């Protein structure tokens, strides 16, 4: 399903666009068909043209579409005028595509509760600084629109930040916006073009899928930057992005196809290779259905499975601490738990159940053995997670994506998806949502920076996918790790579950609630700011483990997480709670 039009820009003999794009409110453009190759060791210090954005509504720049006219041109930086400037936004005149819903001053300490949201969305957060909250509805096409907000803090540092989304949701990331505002960023978030954690609005509407894929983010960033400039009476100095899960995929989509929008990107647990991820996520339900009740390990055996997993693999990093520093080294053998002759212990399993576990921990291959998605990396609790997430019904994201976006059939049965379905999804890839080119050459040439992290206890999006992407990029761009380090660094966070939490030192400043420090050595957001603005790149990320998992109880220990492809190893005789006793090794 191509999104290309017949209005093609001039191209060179390799099919690369020669005309740089100009920013537009929709961020609407074709998907690139050609990757840019580099010879081994080639430096990335020569500017390369960006791909031209294709405008849905013809405009020369953001300013020609979005015109903010406030009655009295006050400086929001003056404390006495901040609340008045905020109030003026409620009557500001925008283009016909942009409708102002409200503009409110929100004082520090407010427990913000947003009524009327889809119940699948989180609707509350704590605002810790004075800010102006502007809500807008932006029409992106004749059949699509985006709900977005711009948060403008009194303590503005001159920086701008966009936030991402999660799952297939249409939920604003209020907690991430509050976190960004607390650090002095003006920030934006959007509902990604639809409401709630579902994909029903994708049905027969490619424009809504386009918003989900990228346009809601490019639109909200363009509008947010213009609002920021008008409100503070000066343009932002640097532009950043923060997101995890689907938000991680969105960050890579920006780096890959819209490299001019952000100077620094923090992308966690990315849902890239989206079509492969949907196939993998949907496979668990099929495995469980085919195995039947007697083929799924009983709950009485789950603790024994976890114990055997750790007995086989916990020592591989030199520390017996319940955390796997590199689960890719763990080749778990569930057959060790098969009941011996005459054994009736409920903690042992049958051969059929061992086979089910094998299937859970296997990569996915499609038609003719083609790669679809890597395996789930083993981690304590993985069987319990699979049971809770996939047993009762097909995984919601997979179910809705295939029904409403791919096959346009609400009655399509997703119980037993297979290689032909997976191949169809990858070949059709509506609006380029897959995000799997492995080519960040335009971002690198521009000088933008990307910090990528993934929790190694993530059972929702396999951390192996991030390893696979890094190596895909290395091959696609023909770059060594030292050359990749100039613009992109990937950190594996041991003991982190999906985007946050888990059993390890997972507080790395990617979320406000999971932040132990604003120091760039311990905070991925301030680290990318330091990299962009001071040229100091992170060689490691120090994570914190809170006592009993509670931030209020303080830090129990810290651990430095290595830059891929290095892995953490405890020095002989070391104490696993001592950060100095760990080292990064190949």
Image: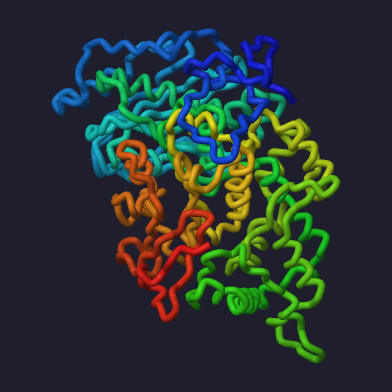
Residue 17 in the image: state x and y as whole percent: 60, 18
444 and 349: which one is in front? Answer: 444
Q: How is the image coloured?
A: rainbow
Residue drawn where x is 42% and y is 21% of the image: 223
Residue 380 horizontal side relative to residue 178, left or right? right
Q: Is residue 387 visible?
A: yes
Q: Is residue 61 above or below residue 27?
A: above
Residue 496 in the image: state x and y as whole percent: 49, 59
Residue 406 horizontal side relative to residue 182, left or right? right
Q: Is residue 188 above or below residue 64?
A: below
Residue 573 in the image: state x and y as whole percent: 42, 81
Residue drawn where x is 52% and y is 42% of the image: 248
Which residue is outermost to the left? 80
Image quarter in which the N terminus is found = top right
Residue drawn where x is 28% and y is 37% of the image: 184
Corner quadrant of residue 80: top left
364 and 285: which one is in front? Answer: 364
Q: Is residue 201 visible?
A: no
Corner quadrant of residue 237: top left
Q: Is residue 307 above or below residue 52?
A: below
Residue 524 in the image: state x and y as whole percent: 39, 48
Residue drawn where x is 20% and y is 17% of the image: 74
Residue 21 horizontal side relative to residue 242, left or right? right
Q: How many marks?
A: 0
529 and 400: which one is in front? Answer: 529
């Amino acid at each position: 399903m191509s999104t290309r039009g017949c209005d093609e820009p001039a191209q060179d003999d390799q099919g690369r666009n020669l005309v740089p794009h100009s920013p537009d409110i929709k961020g609407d453009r074709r998907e690139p068909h050609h990757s840019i190759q580099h010879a081994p060791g080639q430096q990335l210090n020569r500017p390369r043209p960006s791909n031209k954005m294709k405008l849905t509504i013809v405009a020369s720049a953001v300013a020609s579409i979005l015109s903010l006219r406030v009655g009295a041109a006050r400086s929001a930086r003056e404390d006495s005028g901040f609340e008045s400037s905020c109030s003026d936004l409620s009557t500001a005149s925008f283009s016909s595509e942009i409708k102002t819903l409200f503009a409110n001053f929100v004082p520090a300490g407010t427990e913000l509760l947003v009524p009327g949201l889809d119940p699948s969305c989180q609707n509350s957060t704590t605002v810790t600084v004075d800010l102006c909250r502007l809500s807008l509805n932006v029409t992106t096409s004749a059949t699509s629109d985006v709900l977005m907000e711009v948060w403008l803090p009194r303590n503005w540092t001159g920086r701008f930040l966009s936030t991402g989304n999660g799952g297939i949701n249409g939920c604003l990331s209020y907690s991430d916006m509050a976190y960004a505002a607390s650090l002095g960023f003006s920030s934006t978030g959007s509902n990604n073009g639809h409401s709630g954690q579902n994909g029903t609005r994708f049905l027969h509407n490619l424009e809504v899928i386009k918003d989900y894929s990228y346009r809601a983010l490019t639109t909200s960033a363009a509008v947010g930057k213009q609002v920021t400039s008008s409100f503070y009476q000066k343009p932002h100095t640097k532009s950043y992005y923060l997101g995890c899960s689907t938000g991680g995929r969105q960050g890579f989509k920006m780096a890959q196809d819209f490299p001019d929008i952000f100077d620094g990107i923090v992308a966690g647990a990315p849902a890239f290779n989206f079509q492969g991820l949907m196939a993998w996520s949907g496979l668990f339900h099929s495995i469980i259905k085919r195995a039947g009740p007697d083929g799924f390990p009983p709950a009485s055996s789950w603790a024994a499975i976890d114990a055997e997993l750790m007995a086989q693999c916990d020592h591989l990093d030199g520390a017996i601490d319940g955390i796997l520093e590199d689960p890719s080294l763990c080749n778990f053998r569930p057959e060790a738990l098969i009941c011996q002759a005459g054994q009736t212990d409920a903690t042992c399993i049958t051969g059929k159940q061992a086979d089910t576990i094998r299937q859970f921990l296997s990569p996915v291959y499609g038609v003719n053995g083609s790669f679809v998605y890597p395996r789930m990396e083993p981690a304590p609790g993985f069987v319990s997670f699979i049971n809770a997430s996939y047993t009762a019904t097909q995984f919601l994201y997979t179910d809705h994506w295939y029904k409403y976006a791919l096959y346009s059939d609400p009655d399509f049965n997703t119980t037993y998806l297979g290689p032909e379905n997976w191949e169809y999804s990858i070949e059709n890839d509506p609006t380029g949502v897959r995000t799997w080119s492995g080519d960040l050459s335009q971002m690198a040439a521009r000088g933008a920076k990307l910090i990528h992290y993934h929790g190694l206890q993530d059972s929702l999006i396999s951390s192996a996918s991030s390893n696979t992407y890094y190596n895909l990029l290395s091959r696609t761009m023909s770059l060594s790790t030292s050359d990749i380090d100039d613009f992109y660094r990937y950190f594996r966070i041991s003991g982190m579950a999906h985007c946050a939490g888990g059993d390890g030192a997972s507080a790395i400043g990617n979320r406000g609630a999971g932040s132990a420090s604003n120091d760039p050595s311990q905070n991925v957001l301030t680290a990318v700011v330091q990299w962009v603005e001071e040229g100091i790149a992170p060689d490691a990320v120090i994570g914190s483990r809170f006592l009993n998992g509670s931030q209020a109880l303080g830090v129990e220990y810290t651990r430095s997480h290595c830059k891929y492809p290095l892995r953490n190893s405890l020095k002989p005789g070391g104490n696993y709670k001592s950060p100095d006793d760990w080292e990064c090794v190949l």
